[in-house]
Amino acid sequence: MSGLPAPPAPGEEAGTACLNARQAATYLQLNEKKLYELANSRELPAARVGGKWLFPRALLDEWLLEQAHGGALTDRLLITGSDDPLLAATVAALAPELAGEAFVAYSPTGTLAGLELLARRRANACALHWGSDAHSASQHPMLLRRFAMHRHWTLVRLARREQGVILRAGLEVVGIETLAAFDYRWAMRQAGAGSRHFLESALADRGLRPEDCSVTAIAHTEREAAGLVARGEADCAPGTRAAAGEFGLDFLPLGWEAFDLALPREVVFRKLFQRLLQAYGAAPMAALAERFGGYDLSPLGRVLALD
């Protein structure tokens, strides 16, 4: 491959979102036989619709960029979305092992904000959780379908986690009704965070609302919320048992949830992503999960259908 992509073929609009095989072959300066070979082997971003191949122009441009950089972009893994102590520990342990070989980074933003970044191709994967474990098979795909890019995504299960309320050490309460009805100080998560959504559902089941809680701070990550409680700036916060365990705090359980990664299908098979999965389930992380509490790693690596 040499030079720049060819100009649009006659009759082809420069802003066309998807190209047919003839247009894509012209755009990439390939013959159609080679184009079909790359599409069938999943080396080239394409979708088969109604028996015909379509090639998203934006993804072709990304593919070209990766080829121009010698595949360097396949050696970068940027993860966003929901916060998770075990995923943070895995990335922290993996990064120095990779040294100059590859780059992996984790920047938690909350579930919905993370999906926005994934949809804009600012991240390679988004960690997410949305509601109870029993409803995740429907809720997680429904969440992804809010975004036009979801047809190119898949879900990979990392774990099941115990979700509830992080409590300051020594705070003894029997239910969230007490935390909402009395003047306890909440470090509340922002709108669009999975932990806040879980709490809202639990409160609604009891005829309560987040507005019934005395909120003294907004935490934009789970570990920030746990830190506020640990420093005595709040009495409680929505979050996982693992976040409470990491900071030596008490915990009020509300139920279990599925914890998944949403990512483009082609990223699943990259060596770097597979290495991340192996590290997440390796003995050191399994021991850490046991120490934090609230993890079930048995479903790790399961690829989930979106339909």
Image: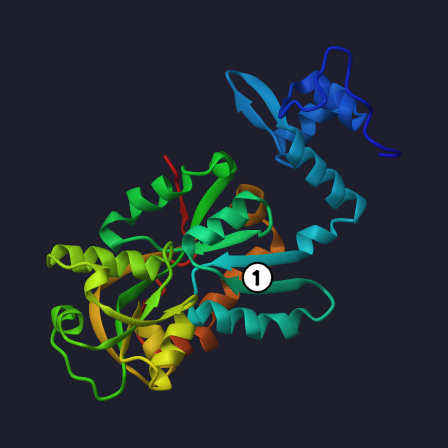
Q: Which residue is mark 1?
A: 275
Instruction: Name the outermost residue toward the right.
Output: 3
Q: Is 263 displayed left or right of 130 in the figure? A: right
On the question of residue 44 being in view, the answer is no
On the question of residue 72 being in view, the answer is yes
Element assignment for label 1:
helix
Where the C terminus falls, by quadrant?
A: top left
Q: Is 266 displayed left or right of 84 in the figure? A: right
Q: Residue at x 75, y 38 (%)?
A: 64
Give the image location of residue 51, x and y in percent: 53, 16
Give the image location of residue 107, x and y in percent: 54, 63
Work out whether residue 34 or residue 65 is closer to the camera in this orientation and state it.
65
Q: Residue at x 16, y 55 (%)?
A: 204
Q: Which quarter of the figure has residue 305?
A: top left
The kind of residue on which mark 1 rests is Arg
Q: Residue at x 42, y 51 (%)?
A: 112
Q: Which quarter of the figure has residue 275?
A: bottom right
